[in-house]
């Protein structure tokens, strides 16, 4: 059995991370009867290894809780894992597409600003580059 610090060192995470996972119920340490310290068993080490691997794959802690809950009932969590990761891949793909559209807008704006002067702010204008960009881009559409 390991203490919080020992377990944290083994997995190169902070002791606070271990405590947080314990508070969420992802790890279930026993309490030492003499001093009240948390003691982590081999089962906790296995769960922590699983949890850290799942996080590297992009699973949230709530998703990991669902996966562990499914496994605890004796059912296979694999269909849930596939469903969750397929959904996450779709979300990331959408985020990447939006990021590419944003980058294209930014590049277009920068190109259109190359020849424009640097005007000083006035009561009616903060930065004419940004304020006039959408007007110029809507004329091109």
Image: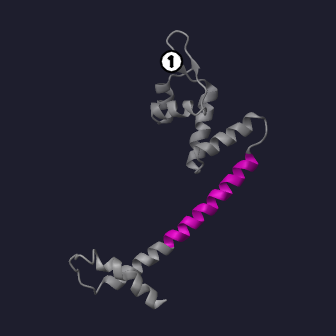
Callout 1 environment at 10 Å: few (<14), some (14 to 19), or many (20+)? Answer: few
Foreground residue, 132 or 113?
132
Q: Give the range drawn in magenta.
A: 78-100
On whether residue 91 falls in the magenta region, the answer is yes
User: Which residue is tagged 1?
Assistant: 37
74 lies above or below 54: above
Q: Say which element carries label 1.
A: loop
Which residue occupies 27% across, 78% down?
124
Instruction: Name the residue: 70% across, 37% down.
Output: 69
- Along the line of sight, the residue nearer the viewer: 13 or 19: 19
Q: Position of residue 122 (x, y in %)?
A: 22, 77
Relative to 121, residue 20 above or below: above
Q: In which quarter of the image is residue 108?
A: bottom left
Of 116 and 136, nearer the camera is: 136
Q: Is residue 127 magenta?
A: no
Residue at left 63%, top 63%?
Answer: 90
Residue 131, image x, y percentages: 34, 79
Judged from this view, the residue extending furthest toward the right is: 75
Quadrant where the image shows the N terminus: top right
Q: Nearer the viewer, residue 20 or 129?
A: 129
Q: Is the magenta stretch mostly helix, strand or loop?
A: helix
Q: Where is residue 20 in the image (x, y as percent from the top left)?
A: 51, 33
Whether 19 is drawn above or below 139: the answer is: above
């Amino acid at each position: 059995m390991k203490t919080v610090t020992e377990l944290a060192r083994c997995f190169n995470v902070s002791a606070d991370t271990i405590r947080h996972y314990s508070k969420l119920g992802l790890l279930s340490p026993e309490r030492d009867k003499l001093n009240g310290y948390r003691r982590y068993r081999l089962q906790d080490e296995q769960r922590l290894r699983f949890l850290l691997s799942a996080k590297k794959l992009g699973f949230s802690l709530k998703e990991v809780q669902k996966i562990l809950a499914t496994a605890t009932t004796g059912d296979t969590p694999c269909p849930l894992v596939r469903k969750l990761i397929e959904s996450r891949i779709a979300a990331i793909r959408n985020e990447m597409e939006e990021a590419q559209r944003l980058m294209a807008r930014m590049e277009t704006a920068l190109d259109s600003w190359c020849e424009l002067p640097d005007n000083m702010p006035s009561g009616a204008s903060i930065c004419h580059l940004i304020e006039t960009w959408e007007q110029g881009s809507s004329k091109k559409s």
